[in-house]
Amino acid sequence: MKLKGKTAIVTGGGSGIGRAAVMAFVLEGAQVAVADIARENAEKARDAASDCGFAPAIACVVDLTKRSEVERLVDNVLQEFGQIDVLVNCAGWDRLEPFIESDEETWDKIIGINFKSVLYTTKAVLPHMIARSSGKIINIASDAGRVGSSWEAVYSGAKGAVIAFSKTLARETARFHINVNVVCPGLTATPLLEAVRTQSEQTQRIIDAVIKATPFRRPAQPEEIAAMVLFLSSRDADFVTGQTISVNGGLTMV
């Protein structure tokens, strides 16, 4: 097992890519904290992970946009498992609309969930990782943050910020043997994608057009993104840091 004896925090672990990452980790022997704002999702993911029988999992209900709750999350995980080896930031949210029609309330929500939460979790776990001179941080961004995406101006900006932040953090923490990398999914078959698709007829057309432009002509499955997250969390990626890796079926090739 590649992660036996390791402990991971997965934000947004109750559904979508996060849940797939949780399952991938426990199957490789890692203890996992499923961090999600939705209690029911977190507990269902915990139960599914625990049923595998390879390693324990706990459900942690947390609003990642509130720094005090994030700090409490990290304290609870350290109390439960004694260490944090991997942090995976999967939590995300978006609303498709032209920028000219968007409002500040939406901006704040997108930036809070997609970027500030990454700052909060990273700030909370780094002292522990630095003290142990070991750690892996994997941030889930988006190809929208690399090349832009129509009707996703603020989301693209937030994900672009995650990419730039991660590269800088990788430089700052390499001397402590901490790896920081970014995974950029293309369209992925998650509850968020379905919510965006059903938002309006226009958003449905946008999603369909992106799928048509993808060489493989389909969205990714969450497990396909989780496989890359698992690789970057393992010893196989000990010499990989500061990288931004797209898993998008060839939609962009940058």
Image (spheres, rainbow, N blue to C red):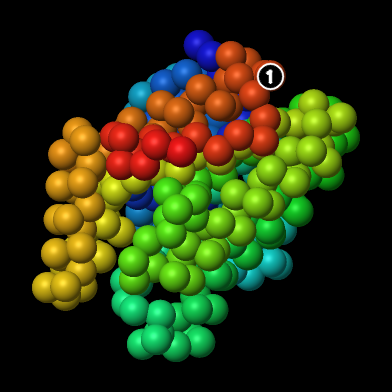
**Where residue 30 sits: x, y (%)?**
54, 25
Side of 197 where 222 appears, left or right:
right
Nearest the viewer among 158 and 100 is: 100
**Where residue 86 sits: x, y (%)?**
63, 34
According to the picture, the residue beneath numbered tag 1 turns out to be 239
Label 1's element?
A: loop
Asked if one can make out residue 193 in the rendered structure from this viewpoint, the answer is yes
Nearest the viewer among 1 and 212 is: 212
* Number of dots carrying numbers: 1
Q: Residue at point 61% right, 19% down?
A: 237
Where 28 sits versus 120, above or below?
above
Q: Residue at point 64% right, 24% down?
A: 240
Where 28 sits versus 73, above or below?
above
Nearest the viewer among 137 and 161 is: 161
In the image, what residue type sits under mark 1? Answer: Phe
Where 85 sits versus 43, above or below?
above
Q: How busy is the neighbourhood of tag 1: few (under 14 within 10 Å), some, or many (20 plus)?
A: few
Side of 69 where 192 appears, left or right:
left
Q: Residue at point 50% right, 46% down?
A: 140
Nearest the viewer among 31 and 216 is: 216
Picture quadrant of residue 179:
top right
Q: Residue at point 32% right, 77% down?
A: 97
Asked if one can make out residue 33 in the rendered structure from this viewpoint, the answer is no
Picture quadrant of residue 88:
top right
What residue occupies the far top of the structure in this picture? 1
Picture quadrant of residue 243:
top right
**Where residue 197 sits: x, y (%)?**
19, 63
